[in-house]
């Protein structure tokens, strides 16, 4: 099999999405060098080592998959959002654009704000969404003369097994399943202003496969694309899957103190047009088809959530 890149540099390689991407690229035969602020093994590098490694392999075809970020929206992580999401991405943009090193950047649907039914343009409400939009700006500005070497992926609500470490950023399907297993009840956070939530949930392995296909298409003919299914699921429908599994009670409760309702996404839906232009038609995994395997994983590994 012909690979377009000799080396793939993956930030966030120890994270939920990063591990899935690394697995599929390893299987395909890519040489992947991983970077993470929380290394999972001795072969994972610290993010600041990325720049020296890129210099050391300048004679080879390289690509950077920038999936590393601080995603927590709690105030105690505000300085990390600034330094890791904004400052690091800005440095990476300048470095790679000057050397014509292609970059795939994981942005987020958080740039659209809390309710895409009301506005589908960028309107981030929280620190995380604002930091991702700032990262997009740094990259597009730096790559303005070589946009074929940049692609920005606005990832929608990614779910799958092994999300426990994500704490308050855990996907709704995983949180509901763990609630059902450990408490035999599913709690839907709501308020007078926020009810009837629906989100576009995308399976983590679909993200990995999409990234693999994107690498095959370099140079890219679209810079910015939503990465989601385009088919939102209501929270009630997700909860009903859990209830059908073990008769868990479904209840509506107030938002926990750790979550700011003003930043909470009520409705998201991806526009898959640009994604399909790059990789063609993609058949997404359905949440209900993946449900049993995720349930089985958490049945073996989960503890009661902290929130």
Image (cartoon, helix red, strand yellow):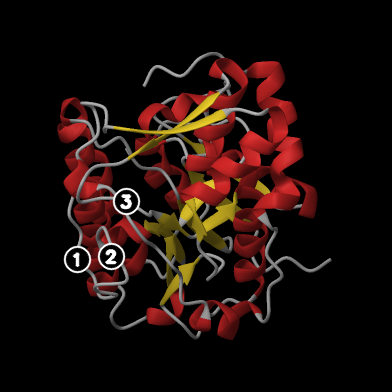
The residue identified by callout 2 is 112
Question: Where the C terminus falls, by quadrant?
Answer: top left
The mark that comes first in sequence, 2 or 1, is 2
C-alpha distance separating marks 3 and 1: 20 Å
**Residue 14 in sight:** no
> Residue 22: x percent and y percent?
64, 44
> Residue 58: x percent and y percent?
49, 58
Q: Are marks 2 and 1 in contact (CB under 8 Å)?
A: yes
C-alpha distance separating marks 2 and 3: 19 Å
The residue positioned 27% from the left and 32% from the top of the image is 254
**Residue 136 in sight:** yes
Between marks 2 and 3 in the image, the one whose residue lies nearer the viewer: 3
Q: Is residue 106 above or below residue 220?
A: above
Q: Please give the label number shown on residue 195.
A: 3
The mark that comes first in sequence, 2 or 3, is 2
Q: Nearer the viewer, residue 42 or 216?
A: 216
The residue positioned 46% from the left and 40% from the top of the image is 12
How would you rate the neighbour count of disc 2 (Cα within 10 Å): few for under 14, some for 14-19, many for 20 or more?
A: many
Q: Are marks 3 and 1 in contact (CB under 8 Å)?
A: no
Between marks 3 and 1 in the image, the one whose residue lies nearer the viewer: 3
The residue identified by callout 1 is 123
**Element under disc 1:** loop
> Residue 162: x percent and y percent?
60, 30
**Element under disc 2:** helix
């Amino acid at each position: 099999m012909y690979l377009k890149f000799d080396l793939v540099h993956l930030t966030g390689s120890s994270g939920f999405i990063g591990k899935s991407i690394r697995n599929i690229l390893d299987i395909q035969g890519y040489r992947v060098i991983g970077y993470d602020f929380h290394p999972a093994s001795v072969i994972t590098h610290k993010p600041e080592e990325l720049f020296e490694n890129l210099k050391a392999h300048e004679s080879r075809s390289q690509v950077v998959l920038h999936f590393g970020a601080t995603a927590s929206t709690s105030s105690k992580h505000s300085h990390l959002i600034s330094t890791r999401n904004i400052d690091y991405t800005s440095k990476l943009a300048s470095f790679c654009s000057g050397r014509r090193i292609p970059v795939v950047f994981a942005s987020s649907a958080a740039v659209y704000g809390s309710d895409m039914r009301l506005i589908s343009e960028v309107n981030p409400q929280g620190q995380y969404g604002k930091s991702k939009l700032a990262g997009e700006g740094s990259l597009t500005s730096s790559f303005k003369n070589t946009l074929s070497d940049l692609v920005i992926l606005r990832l929608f609500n990614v779910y799958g097994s092994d999300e426990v470490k994500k704490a308050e950023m855990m996907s709704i399907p995983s949180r509901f399943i763990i609630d059902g297993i450990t408490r035999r009840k599913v709690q839907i956070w709501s308020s007078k202003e926020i009810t009837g939530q629906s989100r576009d949930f995308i399976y983590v392995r679909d993200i990995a496969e999409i990234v693999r296909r994107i690498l095959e298409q370099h140079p890219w003919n679209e810079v910015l694309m939503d990465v989601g299914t385009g088919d939102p699921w209501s929270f009630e429908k997700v909860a009903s899957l859990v209830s059908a599994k073990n008769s868990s009670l479904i209840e509506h409760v107030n938002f926990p103190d750790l979550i700011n309702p003003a930043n909470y996404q009520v409705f998201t839906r991806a526009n898959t047009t640009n994604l399909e232009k790059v990789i063609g038609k993609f058949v997404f995994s359905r949440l209900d088809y993946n449900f049993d395997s995720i349930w089985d994983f958490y049945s073996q590994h989960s503890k009661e959530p902290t929130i």
